[in-house]
């Protein structure tokens, strides 16, 4: 069994919709993750805040993003256990993030710390 | 009460106090000596009281005898000079005068410290539970064997191995350091949780024994709450969970010992005093920032104390299970989560969720699938119930599944 990270990229939902809609998305996300956890395939996960975010660039140049204003912003991640990339992709397809056109879930295999990968 | 009835009653209540204090005074390596002194004390009580009548203050009599026996034992024992005496020096005012302190405060302190000592990471969970029952709850070997549905020999072996471990690791009987308390408390809570479950889910037909196990787990958890340093949110959450579960004790089994499913329970048999207590401790538990699995399980148990199946109830239960499974997976939680899911989203969607679980060795899994198919596809429901029936091990479970098939 390998581990895969599912990286969510989307705009700051809080700026787009009502708190009630956010609440619904939150529940959908929890139901989705709960479904993965119920299969004993969930490792860890968290959301990333759009406030207090910076990018540090070459020569220590610090910028304020952009965060949340573009669909490419990373909004969170979860790490799942899966037999293959295909199984991990099937998990990703259930993510409520994908209800927004232009949003994406990037699926990447986690390197094992076994000195080979 | 006459001696034959009075002694078992006193034994349970007083032997654990005497043993804990003696263990504390003699050190973990002399646990067996402590147990022996306690047994001898009660044996003498049985012999003496039967002929001479019960003394005016039986507890004081027991304590005085136990103290004397401990003192004699220490004087006689050649180990005393070499090993025990240096440890006892602080408490002994004059060499040779050993004070065994059986005050309420020292009893409580010794029990708490023994609880931490017994819940040592070097001992497997079943050994910890066994020792807790023996030393902290005053259970006899036969009672422990009954509770675990195994032989006295197995329990004896288990206990002596656990004691051997404690000796080998030179586990001190003391309150853990402030910096270590949370880590140590985690293990203690796991043991108490398992001790409670042992009583609540035991297949043993002995209802009184099962209830006793639950009560003892609650008493020990309460001991932690009474102490300022261990009165932490997770401890309160655990006690809350135990109260909520115990509130259904009378309602969840019929006179033949068969499980009555939650939806079929007579809620007038629920103990509302315990439900209130559970709510109180859950409120106490809501302080602090860390959410433990006991918080989530207590939350789930809280919603189950409301019989009506409202949308709000099942949505809350589903979210709590979602959270719990992320923290710690277990097949039971996965199945219960799917049941809650069906209540919120409907059976059709729940079938898709359920089939992903693939818990193919588990009869509850097929029972759940049978339930979900019941209204739409009775042949699929039947075949799932049949698989469940063939996987079920106990007569009670088989009976429950059979009834479901008949209802199709």
Image (tube, rainbow, N blue to C red):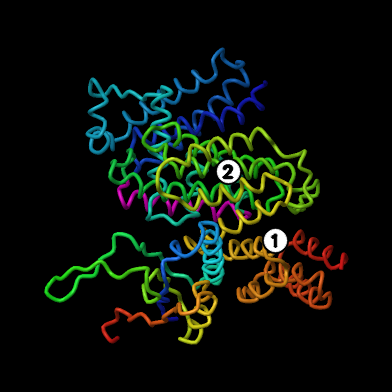
Q: Relative to residue B62, is residue B208 depicted above or below?
A: below
Q: Position of residue B2 (x, y in %)?
A: 67, 21
* The N terminus of chain B: image quadrant: top right
B218 displayed left or right of B377: left
Left or right, B253 with respect to B243, comes to right
Residue B242's disc is 2
Of helix, strand and loop, which one carries label 2? Answer: helix
Q: Are marks 2 and 1 in contact (CB under 8 Å)?
A: no
Q: Are marks 2 and 1 on the same chain?
A: yes
Q: According to the image, label 1 marks what residue?
A: B343
Q: Confirm whether the magenta stretch covers residue B194.
A: no
The x, y position of residue B90, in whole percent, is 23, 28
User: Which of pointers 2 and 1 lies earlier in the amino acid sequence?
Assistant: 2
- Residues at marks 2 and 1, CA–CA distance in whole angstroms: 25 Å
- Which quadrant holds the C terminus of chain B? bottom right
- A53 left or right of B20? left
In the image, A74 versus B66, the foreground residue is A74
Asked if the stretch drawn in magenta spans residue B161, the answer is yes
Q: Is residue B53 visible?
A: yes
Q: Name the one closer to the observer, B53 or B364.
A: B364
Which segment did they paint magenta? Answer: B149-171
Q: Residue at x 29, y 81 (%)?
A: A114
As drawn, B50 above or below B231: above
SS at mark 1 in the image: helix
Q: How many numbered discs, if any?
A: 2
- Tell me which secondary structure the magenta stretch mostly adopts: helix
Graded by Cα atoms within 10 Å as few (under 14), some (14 to 19) or many (20 or more), the crowding at tag 1 reads some
């Amino acid at each position: 069994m390998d581990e895969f990270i599912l990286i969510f990229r989307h705009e700051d939902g809080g700026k787009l919709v009502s708190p009630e809609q956010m609440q619904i998305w939150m529940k959908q996300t929890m139901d989705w993750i709960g479904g993965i956890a119920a299969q004993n395939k969930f490792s860890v996960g968290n959301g990333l805040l759009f406030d207090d975010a910076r990018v540090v660039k070459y020569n220590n140049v610090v910028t304020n993003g952009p965060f949340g204003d573009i669909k490419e912003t990373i909004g969170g991640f979860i790490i799942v256990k899966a037999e293959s990339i295909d199984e991990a992709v099937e998990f990703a397809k259930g993510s409520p993030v994908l209800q927004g056109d232009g949003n994406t879930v990037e699926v990447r295999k986690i390197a094992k710390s076994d000195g080979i990968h | 009460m006459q001696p034959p009835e009075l002694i078992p009653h006193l034994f349970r209540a007083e032997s654990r106090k005497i043993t804990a204090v003696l263990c504390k005074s003699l050190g973990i390596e002399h646990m067996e000596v402590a147990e022996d002194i306690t047994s001898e004390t009660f044996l003498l009580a049985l012999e003496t009281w039967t002929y001479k009548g019960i003394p005016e203050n039986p507890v004081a009599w027991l304590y005085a005898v136990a103290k004397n026996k401990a003192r004699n034992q220490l004087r006689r024992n050649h180990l005393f000079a070499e090993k025990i005496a240096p440890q006892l020096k602080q408490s002994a005012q004059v060499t040779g005068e050993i004070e065994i302190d059986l005050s309420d405060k020292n009893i409580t302190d010794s029990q708490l410290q023994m609880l931490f000592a017994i819940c040592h990471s070097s001992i497997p969970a079943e050994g910890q539970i066994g020792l807790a029952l023996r030393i902290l709850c005053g259970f006899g070997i036969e009672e422990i064997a009954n509770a675990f549905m195994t032989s006295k020999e197995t329990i004896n072996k288990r206990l002596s191995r656990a004691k051997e471990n404690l000796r080998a690791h030179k586990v001190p009987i003391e309150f853990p350091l402030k910096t270590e308390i949370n880590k140590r408390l985690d293990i203690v809570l796991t043991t108490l949780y398992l001790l409670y479950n042992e009583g609540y889910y035991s297949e043993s037909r002995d209802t009184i024994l099962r209830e006793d196990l639950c009560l003892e787990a609650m008493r020990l958890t309460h001991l932690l709450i009474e102490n300022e340093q261990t009165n932490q949110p997770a401890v309160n959450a655990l006690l809350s969970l135990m109260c909520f579960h115990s509130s259904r004790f009378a309602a969840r089994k019929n006179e033949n010992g068969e499980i009555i499913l939650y939806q079929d329970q007579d809620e007038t048999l629920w103990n509302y005093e315990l439900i209130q207590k559970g709510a109180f401790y859950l409120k106490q538990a809501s302080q602090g920032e860390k959410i433990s699995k006991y918080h989530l399980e207590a939350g789930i148990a809280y919603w189950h104390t409301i019989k009506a199946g409202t949308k709000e109830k099942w949505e809350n239960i589903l979210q709590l299970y979602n959270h719990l499974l992320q923290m710690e997976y277990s097949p039971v939680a996965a199945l219960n989560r799917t049941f809650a899911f069906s209540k919120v989203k409907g059976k059709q969607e729940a079938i898709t969720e359920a089939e992903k679980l693939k818990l193919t060795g588990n009869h509850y899994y097929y029972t759940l699938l049978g339930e979900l198919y019941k209204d739409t596809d009775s042949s699929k429901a039947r075949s799932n119930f049949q698989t469940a029936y063939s996987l079920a091990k106990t007569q009670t479970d088989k009976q429950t599944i059979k009834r479901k098939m008949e209802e199709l």
